[in-house]
Amino acid sequence: MNRRLLLLVVLVLLGGLAWWISSRSGPSTLDRPLSDFAVADTAGVTRIYIADKQGRHIDLKRTDRGWSLNDTFMAKPHDVTMLLRTFKRVEVKSPVPKAAEAHTLRVMGAASKKVEIYEGGDVPSKIWIVGHGTQDHFGTYMLLEKPGEGRSNAPFIMGMGGFIGTLFQRFHTKLDDWRDTEVYRFTDQRELATVELRTPLAPANSYRIDQDPDGRFSLLDHQGRPYAFDTVLVHGAVLSLKQVNFERIERLKRTTRDSLLGATPSHILQITDRTGKKNTTKIWYLPYTGPAPTFDRAQPLFDDIRMYALVQDTLVVVMQRPQLERVLQPISGFMR
């Protein structure tokens, strides 16, 4: 009797040891495929973590202000929304044929991305292994893993309802491409207190617009003197600042960047909100590099579409000139 009891205790201990080792090892491969990739309620997604084989990662977290990026920046709302839409609408197009499974898994092992989807808590609810596109570019090879349950033993060709193409581009890991491009944003125009434009090479073109809490404007010239103005024109300039975004981050070579920042800006635009917070943007026009004009027209000095700007104190970006056209005009542009 004692021998049987001892044997039972040993078996229980060995079983417990096996479970402990299994629980602390990497994800096990299931003997069945997992195909429930979709997330039914994306409003419950609190974090998205994307990692590639080169060691780069993107960590998106839902906050009261929007989605944070790597705990440092804010992420582009549009790109996060596109991910959430993908989580909800993704669907299996077909399983990978058995004869192609081994090759597909080898390619995925070399170049896939891991996408962890969190729905609260510190453990992801699902992990997608996102691979390459199919030869016809109508599908994307993917594997599913569920923490605590294991990883699927077979990949699937995935797509999305109402969408033709591959999905892997949505899970990129380039930090600059994920950063929010917002420069100015005012949900209520009256939150903006002051717009001050300085034009260092032509000081007389500079001006300052003040707006009181009731939305009434005053306009001052570069010497601080009141200037007669058309209210509609001033209102139009202020309204154009309601939401301004840059086009892209420009990573210049160090010598080029130093040369740009050492040059006199074309404009210095300072926006002050109702709380007193200041937002300063330095702007440099780009030299014209387009085709030569016809003989009866002079060649422009500057590119009329794009310009360089320094935002957030240290970030060099490319901005669209037309979106700030009404703000960058000289003070005479507001004349009655």
Image (tube, rainbow, N blue to C red):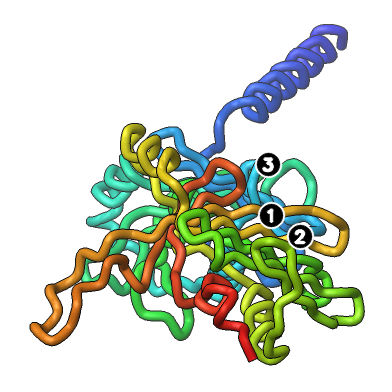
- Left or right: 273 in relation to 243: right
Give x and y (percent) for residue 47: 68, 52
Q: Is residue 1 above or below residue 163?
A: above
At label 2, counting other C-alpha atoms closer than 10 Å, the crowd grade (few under 14, some 14-19, many 20 or more) is some
**Which is nearer the N-term, disc 3 or disc 1?**
3
What's the residue type where badge 1 is placed? Answer: Asn
- Of residues 64 and 54, the one nearer the viewer is 64
Disc 2 versus disc 3: distance between alpha carbons? 26 Å
Q: CA distance from mark 3 to mark 1?
A: 22 Å
Residue 272 numbered tag: 2
Q: Secondary structure at mark 3?
A: loop
Disc with the residue nearer the chain's start (2 vs 3): 3
For image coordinates 54% across by 60% down, the residue present is 203
Image x and y of residue 334, in percent:
61, 83
The reply to whether discs 1 and 2 touch (Cβ–Cβ < 8 Å) is: yes
Q: Quadrant of residue 111?
A: top left
> Which kind of residue does numbered mark 3 sit on?
Asp
Which amino acid, mark 2? Thr
Which quadrant: the C terminus?
bottom right
Q: Residues within 10 Å of mark 1 (few under 14, many from 20)?
A: some
User: Would residue 156 appear left or right of 48 to someone viewing this image?
Assistant: left
Q: Quick one: label 1 or label 2, which is nearer the N terminus? A: 2
**Gap in Å between the C-alphas at discs 1 and 2?**
6 Å
Query: Which part of the image, by quadrant, shows the N terminus?
Result: top right
Q: Please state the horizontal and vertical placement of residue 20, each as a whole percent of the image.
A: 70, 23
In the rendered image, which residue does mark 3 sit on? 71
The label nearer to you, 2 versus 3, is 2
Q: Which residue position is annotated with label 1?
A: 279
The residue that appears at 86% across and 64% down in the rendered structure is 274
Q: Residue furthest left?
A: 295
* Numbered disc 1: secondary structure: strand
